[in-house]
Amino acid sequence: MSGGLTAGTDYDGAMSDADSREFCPRCGDPVPARPEPLPGAPRDRDRRLCDTCYFEDFDLVDAPDRIEVLVCSGCGAIRRGNRWLDVDARDYTDVAVDEVSEALGVHVNARDVTWAVDPEQVDENTIRMHCQFTGVIRETPLEETVVVPVKISRGTCDRCGRIAGGYYNATVQVRADGRTPTPEERDRAVEIAESYIGDREAAGDRNAFITEVEAVDDGVDIRISTTQMGQGVATRIVRELGGSVESYPTLVTEDSDGNEVYRVTYAVRLPEFTPADVIDPGDGDGPVLVRSVSGNLKGIRLATGDAYEAPFDDEGSDARRVATREDAVETTVVAVEDDHAVQVLDPETYAAKTIPRPDFFDSDAETTPVVKTRTGLFVMPE
Protein backbone atom coordinates (compact mmCIF):
# COMPACT_ATOMS: atom_id res chain seq x y z
CA MET A 1 0.00 0.00 0.00
CA SER A 2 1.44 3.33 -0.99
CA GLY A 3 2.57 5.67 1.81
CA GLY A 4 1.75 8.82 -0.19
CA LEU A 5 -0.53 11.60 1.12
CA THR A 6 -4.24 11.33 0.45
CA ALA A 7 -6.05 14.23 -1.21
CA GLY A 8 -7.64 16.80 1.08
CA THR A 9 -5.25 16.28 4.02
CA ASP A 10 -2.02 17.92 5.05
CA TYR A 11 0.85 16.33 6.82
CA ASP A 12 -1.02 16.53 10.18
CA GLY A 13 -4.17 14.94 8.80
CA ALA A 14 -6.20 18.19 9.03
CA MET A 15 -8.96 19.12 6.58
CA SER A 16 -7.95 21.43 3.75
CA ASP A 17 -9.56 24.90 3.33
CA ALA A 18 -11.74 23.57 0.52
CA ASP A 19 -13.14 20.74 2.60
CA SER A 20 -13.71 23.00 5.67
CA ARG A 21 -16.05 25.32 3.81
CA GLU A 22 -19.78 25.42 4.65
CA PHE A 23 -22.41 25.84 1.98
CA CYS A 24 -25.77 27.62 2.16
CA PRO A 25 -28.44 24.92 2.33
CA ARG A 26 -30.81 27.10 0.28
CA CYS A 27 -28.72 28.34 -2.67
CA GLY A 28 -25.53 26.26 -2.36
CA ASP A 29 -23.15 29.20 -2.25
CA PRO A 30 -20.21 28.89 0.14
CA VAL A 31 -20.48 30.69 3.42
CA PRO A 32 -17.77 31.34 5.99
CA ALA A 33 -17.68 28.96 8.91
CA ARG A 34 -19.44 30.42 11.91
CA PRO A 35 -18.50 29.62 15.50
CA GLU A 36 -20.78 27.27 17.37
CA PRO A 37 -22.85 28.95 20.11
CA LEU A 38 -21.72 28.50 23.66
CA PRO A 39 -23.32 25.70 25.68
CA GLY A 40 -26.75 26.81 26.90
CA ALA A 41 -26.97 29.72 24.43
CA PRO A 42 -29.92 29.81 21.99
CA ARG A 43 -29.18 28.31 18.58
CA ASP A 44 -29.96 30.23 15.40
CA ARG A 45 -31.51 27.79 12.94
CA ASP A 46 -30.62 30.17 10.08
CA ARG A 47 -26.96 30.56 11.02
CA ARG A 48 -25.82 28.42 8.06
CA LEU A 49 -27.65 30.59 5.49
CA CYS A 50 -25.63 33.01 3.41
CA ASP A 51 -26.32 36.69 3.94
CA THR A 52 -28.37 36.98 0.74
CA CYS A 53 -30.74 34.16 1.70
CA TYR A 54 -30.78 35.19 5.35
CA PHE A 55 -31.92 38.73 4.64
CA GLU A 56 -34.58 37.62 2.11
CA ASP A 57 -36.88 36.55 4.96
CA PHE A 58 -35.45 38.75 7.69
CA ASP A 59 -37.61 41.21 9.63
CA LEU A 60 -35.83 43.60 11.95
CA VAL A 61 -39.12 44.52 13.64
CA ASP A 62 -42.14 42.44 14.58
CA ALA A 63 -45.19 44.72 14.65
CA PRO A 64 -48.94 44.05 14.93
CA ASP A 65 -51.21 44.99 12.07
CA ARG A 66 -53.14 47.31 14.38
CA ILE A 67 -53.57 48.15 18.04
CA GLU A 68 -56.84 48.96 19.78
CA VAL A 69 -56.70 50.96 23.01
CA LEU A 70 -59.74 51.02 25.30
CA VAL A 71 -59.86 54.29 27.24
CA CYS A 72 -62.26 55.08 30.10
CA SER A 73 -64.29 58.11 29.06
CA GLY A 74 -64.68 59.07 32.73
CA CYS A 75 -61.16 59.05 34.19
CA GLY A 76 -58.90 58.39 31.20
CA ALA A 77 -57.59 55.05 32.45
CA ILE A 78 -56.63 52.47 29.81
CA ARG A 79 -57.42 48.77 29.71
CA ARG A 80 -54.50 46.35 29.62
CA GLY A 81 -55.46 42.73 29.81
CA ASN A 82 -57.90 42.36 32.70
CA ARG A 83 -56.78 45.52 34.45
CA TRP A 84 -57.50 49.21 34.18
CA LEU A 85 -54.43 51.37 34.60
CA ASP A 86 -54.17 55.08 35.28
CA VAL A 87 -51.73 56.67 32.86
CA ASP A 88 -49.90 59.95 33.13
CA ALA A 89 -50.56 61.11 29.57
CA ARG A 90 -51.16 64.59 28.20
CA ASP A 91 -53.39 63.23 25.45
CA TYR A 92 -54.20 60.01 23.59
CA THR A 93 -51.11 60.40 21.39
CA ASP A 94 -48.96 59.71 24.44
CA VAL A 95 -51.08 56.65 25.16
CA ALA A 96 -50.67 55.45 21.56
CA VAL A 97 -46.87 55.84 21.75
CA ASP A 98 -46.74 53.81 24.96
CA GLU A 99 -48.95 51.06 23.58
CA VAL A 100 -46.94 50.77 20.37
CA SER A 101 -43.71 50.65 22.38
CA GLU A 102 -45.11 47.73 24.39
CA ALA A 103 -46.30 45.85 21.29
CA LEU A 104 -43.25 46.15 19.02
CA GLY A 105 -40.52 43.51 19.06
CA VAL A 106 -36.97 43.83 17.70
CA HIS A 107 -35.01 40.84 16.38
CA VAL A 108 -33.01 39.17 19.14
CA ASN A 109 -29.77 39.27 17.14
CA ALA A 110 -29.96 42.98 16.38
CA ARG A 111 -27.55 45.31 18.14
CA ASP A 112 -27.08 49.07 18.27
CA VAL A 113 -30.82 49.46 17.77
CA THR A 114 -32.34 52.93 17.61
CA TRP A 115 -35.88 53.93 16.81
CA ALA A 116 -38.10 56.95 16.44
CA VAL A 117 -41.84 57.38 16.07
CA ASP A 118 -43.83 59.99 14.18
CA PRO A 119 -47.54 59.96 15.12
CA GLU A 120 -50.10 61.01 12.53
CA GLN A 121 -53.56 61.99 13.81
CA VAL A 122 -55.92 60.57 11.20
CA ASP A 123 -59.15 61.42 13.03
CA GLU A 124 -60.43 61.81 16.57
CA ASN A 125 -60.12 58.09 17.28
CA THR A 126 -57.30 56.93 14.99
CA ILE A 127 -53.58 57.63 15.20
CA ARG A 128 -51.17 56.21 12.61
CA MET A 129 -47.74 55.55 14.13
CA HIS A 130 -44.80 55.74 11.70
CA CYS A 131 -41.93 53.88 13.37
CA GLN A 132 -38.36 54.07 12.01
CA PHE A 133 -35.81 51.47 13.21
CA THR A 134 -32.09 51.03 12.62
CA GLY A 135 -29.84 48.21 13.81
CA VAL A 136 -26.88 46.03 12.91
CA ILE A 137 -27.20 42.34 11.94
CA ARG A 138 -24.23 40.22 10.78
CA GLU A 139 -22.18 43.42 10.70
CA THR A 140 -24.70 44.80 8.19
CA PRO A 141 -26.52 48.07 8.99
CA LEU A 142 -30.26 47.75 8.42
CA GLU A 143 -33.13 50.19 8.41
CA GLU A 144 -36.82 49.36 8.56
CA THR A 145 -40.04 51.37 8.69
CA VAL A 146 -43.35 50.06 10.01
CA VAL A 147 -46.72 51.78 10.24
CA VAL A 148 -49.05 50.73 13.04
CA PRO A 149 -52.59 52.16 13.20
CA VAL A 150 -53.85 52.74 16.74
CA LYS A 151 -57.61 52.81 17.27
CA ILE A 152 -58.91 54.61 20.37
CA SER A 153 -62.13 53.12 21.77
CA ARG A 154 -64.02 54.46 24.76
CA GLY A 155 -65.69 52.62 27.60
CA THR A 156 -66.26 52.80 31.33
CA CYS A 157 -63.80 51.37 33.83
CA ASP A 158 -64.91 49.44 36.91
CA ARG A 159 -64.15 52.37 39.19
CA CYS A 160 -66.18 54.94 37.24
CA GLY A 161 -68.99 52.41 36.87
CA ARG A 162 -69.13 51.97 40.63
CA ILE A 163 -69.11 55.71 41.24
CA ALA A 164 -71.91 56.23 38.71
CA GLY A 165 -73.90 53.46 40.37
CA GLY A 166 -73.57 55.02 43.82
CA TYR A 167 -71.38 52.20 45.15
CA TYR A 168 -69.97 52.61 48.68
CA ASN A 169 -69.09 50.48 51.68
CA ALA A 170 -68.56 53.11 54.38
CA THR A 171 -70.32 56.24 55.58
CA VAL A 172 -68.53 58.78 57.76
CA GLN A 173 -71.16 60.75 59.70
CA VAL A 174 -69.78 63.97 61.17
CA ARG A 175 -71.83 65.25 64.10
CA ALA A 176 -71.08 67.25 67.27
CA ASP A 177 -71.80 66.72 70.94
CA GLY A 178 -74.63 68.98 72.09
CA ARG A 179 -74.43 71.28 69.09
CA THR A 180 -74.32 71.44 65.29
CA PRO A 181 -70.90 71.36 63.59
CA THR A 182 -69.83 74.76 62.35
CA PRO A 183 -69.58 75.40 58.60
CA GLU A 184 -65.79 75.50 59.03
CA GLU A 185 -65.82 72.07 60.71
CA ARG A 186 -68.02 70.60 57.98
CA ASP A 187 -65.80 71.98 55.23
CA ARG A 188 -62.63 70.84 56.97
CA ALA A 189 -64.00 67.31 57.48
CA VAL A 190 -64.71 67.05 53.75
CA GLU A 191 -61.25 68.45 52.93
CA ILE A 192 -59.63 65.85 55.18
CA ALA A 193 -61.58 63.07 53.44
CA GLU A 194 -60.72 64.36 49.95
CA SER A 195 -57.04 64.71 50.85
CA TYR A 196 -56.81 61.19 52.27
CA ILE A 197 -58.61 59.59 49.32
CA GLY A 198 -56.57 61.71 46.91
CA ASP A 199 -53.34 60.39 48.44
CA ARG A 200 -54.57 56.82 48.01
CA GLU A 201 -55.49 57.50 44.38
CA ALA A 202 -52.06 59.03 43.75
CA ALA A 203 -50.49 55.87 45.17
CA GLY A 204 -52.31 53.84 42.50
CA ASP A 205 -55.28 52.55 44.50
CA ARG A 206 -58.15 52.48 42.00
CA ASN A 207 -60.55 51.38 44.73
CA ALA A 208 -60.19 54.77 46.41
CA PHE A 209 -63.03 57.20 45.76
CA ILE A 210 -65.70 59.28 47.44
CA THR A 211 -69.14 58.42 46.13
CA GLU A 212 -71.13 61.26 47.68
CA VAL A 213 -70.92 64.13 50.15
CA GLU A 214 -74.31 64.99 51.63
CA ALA A 215 -74.96 67.97 53.89
CA VAL A 216 -77.63 67.18 56.51
CA ASP A 217 -79.23 69.33 59.18
CA ASP A 218 -76.95 68.14 61.99
CA GLY A 219 -73.68 67.66 60.09
CA VAL A 220 -72.34 66.02 56.95
CA ASP A 221 -72.31 62.45 55.59
CA ILE A 222 -69.38 61.25 53.45
CA ARG A 223 -69.86 57.98 51.54
CA ILE A 224 -66.59 56.22 50.74
CA SER A 225 -65.68 53.21 48.61
CA THR A 226 -64.22 50.85 51.24
CA THR A 227 -64.60 50.30 54.95
CA GLN A 228 -60.85 50.54 55.48
CA MET A 229 -60.73 53.98 53.88
CA GLY A 230 -63.83 55.05 55.79
CA GLN A 231 -62.05 54.21 59.01
CA GLY A 232 -58.95 56.08 57.83
CA VAL A 233 -60.99 59.21 57.07
CA ALA A 234 -62.85 59.08 60.41
CA THR A 235 -59.60 58.65 62.33
CA ARG A 236 -58.00 61.64 60.63
CA ILE A 237 -61.03 63.87 61.24
CA VAL A 238 -60.97 63.07 64.96
CA ARG A 239 -57.19 63.50 65.07
CA GLU A 240 -57.49 67.07 63.79
CA LEU A 241 -60.91 68.26 64.94
CA GLY A 242 -61.09 66.26 68.17
CA GLY A 243 -63.90 64.11 69.48
CA SER A 244 -64.46 60.38 69.16
CA VAL A 245 -65.57 57.80 66.60
CA GLU A 246 -67.65 54.63 66.86
CA SER A 247 -68.40 52.10 64.12
CA TYR A 248 -71.71 50.39 63.34
CA PRO A 249 -71.60 47.56 60.73
CA THR A 250 -74.71 46.58 58.78
CA LEU A 251 -75.06 43.36 56.77
CA VAL A 252 -76.20 44.23 53.25
CA THR A 253 -75.64 41.12 51.11
CA GLU A 254 -73.47 38.12 50.34
CA ASP A 255 -70.88 37.93 47.57
CA SER A 256 -70.63 35.18 44.94
CA ASP A 257 -68.60 33.03 47.34
CA GLY A 258 -71.20 33.27 50.11
CA ASN A 259 -69.19 35.73 52.21
CA GLU A 260 -71.18 38.31 54.13
CA VAL A 261 -70.76 41.88 52.89
CA TYR A 262 -71.09 44.70 55.38
CA ARG A 263 -71.40 48.44 55.14
CA VAL A 264 -69.97 50.31 58.09
CA THR A 265 -71.09 53.65 59.48
CA TYR A 266 -68.34 55.56 61.27
CA ALA A 267 -70.07 57.99 63.64
CA VAL A 268 -67.72 60.89 64.34
CA ARG A 269 -68.76 62.92 67.36
CA LEU A 270 -66.96 66.27 67.53
CA PRO A 271 -66.40 67.84 70.97
CA GLU A 272 -68.99 70.10 72.53
CA PHE A 273 -66.52 72.97 72.48
CA THR A 274 -64.49 74.43 69.63
CA PRO A 275 -61.36 76.56 69.48
CA ALA A 276 -62.26 80.22 70.26
CA ASP A 277 -64.99 79.17 72.72
CA VAL A 278 -64.77 80.64 76.21
CA ILE A 279 -65.82 77.99 78.73
CA ASP A 280 -66.20 77.78 82.47
CA PRO A 281 -64.81 74.38 83.54
CA GLY A 282 -66.70 74.64 86.83
CA ASP A 283 -63.57 74.29 88.95
CA GLY A 284 -63.74 77.78 90.47
CA ASP A 285 -60.59 79.08 88.73
CA GLY A 286 -62.34 81.17 86.12
CA PRO A 287 -63.04 80.91 82.42
CA VAL A 288 -60.80 79.29 79.79
CA LEU A 289 -60.28 80.32 76.16
CA VAL A 290 -60.21 77.05 74.20
CA ARG A 291 -57.19 76.80 71.92
CA SER A 292 -57.40 73.17 70.74
CA VAL A 293 -59.71 70.15 70.99
CA SER A 294 -57.33 67.66 69.37
CA GLY A 295 -56.72 64.87 71.87
CA ASN A 296 -57.41 66.70 75.11
CA LEU A 297 -59.14 70.03 75.55
CA LYS A 298 -56.41 72.69 75.71
CA GLY A 299 -56.70 76.39 76.43
CA ILE A 300 -55.58 79.36 78.47
CA ARG A 301 -56.96 80.76 81.72
CA LEU A 302 -58.24 84.29 81.12
CA ALA A 303 -57.65 85.36 84.74
CA THR A 304 -53.99 84.31 84.90
CA GLY A 305 -52.75 83.30 81.44
CA ASP A 306 -51.88 79.83 82.72
CA ALA A 307 -52.17 76.87 80.35
CA TYR A 308 -55.18 74.63 80.80
CA GLU A 309 -55.59 71.02 79.69
CA ALA A 310 -58.14 68.36 80.56
CA PRO A 311 -59.35 65.10 79.03
CA PHE A 312 -62.80 65.32 77.53
CA ASP A 313 -63.96 62.59 79.88
CA ASP A 314 -63.20 64.89 82.82
CA GLU A 315 -65.42 67.69 81.63
CA GLY A 316 -68.54 66.12 83.07
CA SER A 317 -71.63 68.30 83.08
CA ASP A 318 -69.98 71.20 84.90
CA ALA A 319 -68.15 72.69 81.91
CA ARG A 320 -70.24 75.12 79.89
CA ARG A 321 -69.76 77.68 77.17
CA VAL A 322 -70.01 81.25 78.45
CA ALA A 323 -68.82 83.26 75.42
CA THR A 324 -66.76 83.09 72.24
CA ARG A 325 -63.85 85.09 70.90
CA GLU A 326 -66.31 86.93 68.65
CA ASP A 327 -67.97 88.34 71.78
CA ALA A 328 -64.77 90.20 72.73
CA VAL A 329 -64.80 94.01 72.37
CA GLU A 330 -62.02 96.55 72.53
CA THR A 331 -62.00 98.82 75.60
CA THR A 332 -59.74 101.47 77.17
CA VAL A 333 -57.05 100.60 79.69
CA VAL A 334 -57.38 103.05 82.61
CA ALA A 335 -54.44 101.95 84.76
CA VAL A 336 -52.22 99.02 85.59
CA GLU A 337 -52.65 98.61 89.34
CA ASP A 338 -50.10 95.85 90.03
CA ASP A 339 -48.85 92.52 88.72
CA HIS A 340 -52.25 90.91 89.20
CA ALA A 341 -54.80 93.68 88.48
CA VAL A 342 -55.61 96.15 85.73
CA GLN A 343 -58.30 98.81 85.55
CA VAL A 344 -60.37 99.09 82.34
CA LEU A 345 -63.60 100.69 81.24
CA ASP A 346 -66.64 98.42 81.23
CA PRO A 347 -67.65 98.42 77.53
CA GLU A 348 -71.35 98.50 78.46
CA THR A 349 -71.49 100.93 81.40
CA TYR A 350 -68.18 102.77 80.76
CA ALA A 351 -67.46 102.57 84.47
CA ALA A 352 -63.88 101.86 85.54
CA LYS A 353 -63.47 98.30 86.76
CA THR A 354 -60.56 96.44 88.26
CA ILE A 355 -60.17 93.00 86.70
CA PRO A 356 -57.52 90.22 86.81
CA ARG A 357 -54.30 90.95 84.91
CA PRO A 358 -53.19 87.79 83.04
CA ASP A 359 -49.60 87.09 81.94
CA PHE A 360 -50.42 87.81 78.30
CA PHE A 361 -51.62 91.37 79.02
CA ASP A 362 -49.47 94.10 77.43
CA SER A 363 -48.83 96.68 80.17
CA ASP A 364 -48.01 99.36 77.57
CA ALA A 365 -51.28 98.93 75.68
CA GLU A 366 -53.79 101.78 75.69
CA THR A 367 -56.66 99.47 74.75
CA THR A 368 -57.31 95.76 75.16
CA PRO A 369 -59.99 93.25 74.10
CA VAL A 370 -62.24 92.04 76.90
CA VAL A 371 -65.11 89.57 77.20
CA LYS A 372 -67.94 89.73 79.71
CA THR A 373 -69.21 86.57 81.37
CA ARG A 374 -71.54 85.89 84.29
CA THR A 375 -68.55 85.81 86.58
CA GLY A 376 -67.12 89.13 85.44
CA LEU A 377 -64.99 90.93 82.88
CA PHE A 378 -61.80 89.30 81.54
CA VAL A 379 -58.96 90.35 79.26
CA MET A 380 -58.74 88.33 76.03
CA PRO A 381 -55.50 87.47 74.20
CA GLU A 382 -54.94 89.31 70.94
Image (tube, helix red, strand yellow):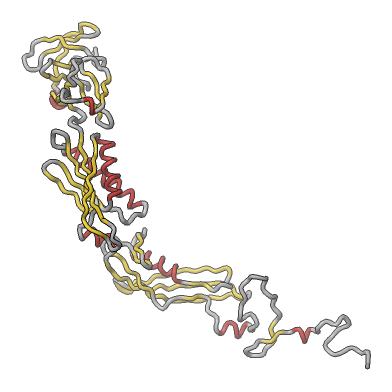
Q: Is residue 307 left or right of residue 59?
A: left
Q: Quadrant of the C terminus?
A: top left
Q: Is residue 368 visible?
A: no
Give me the residue at 30% from left, 46% from top.
Answer: 196
* Residue 44 against residue 25 in the figure, above or below: above
Q: Residue furthest top?
A: 337
Seen from the viewer's position, the closer of residues 363 and 373 is 373
Give me the residue at 93% from left, 89% from top.
Answer: 3
Q: Residue furthest left?
A: 349
* Residue 367 against residue 109 in the figure, above or below: above
| Horizontal and vertical percent position of residue 329 | 13, 22
| Horizontal and vertical percent position of residue 297 | 24, 27
Q: Residue furthest front?
A: 258
To which quarter of the image does residue 118 belong? bottom left
Q: Quadrant of the N terminus?
A: bottom right
Q: Is residue 274 visible?
A: yes
To which quarter of the image does residue 67 belong? bottom left
Seen from the viewer's position, the closer of residues 375 and 260 is 260
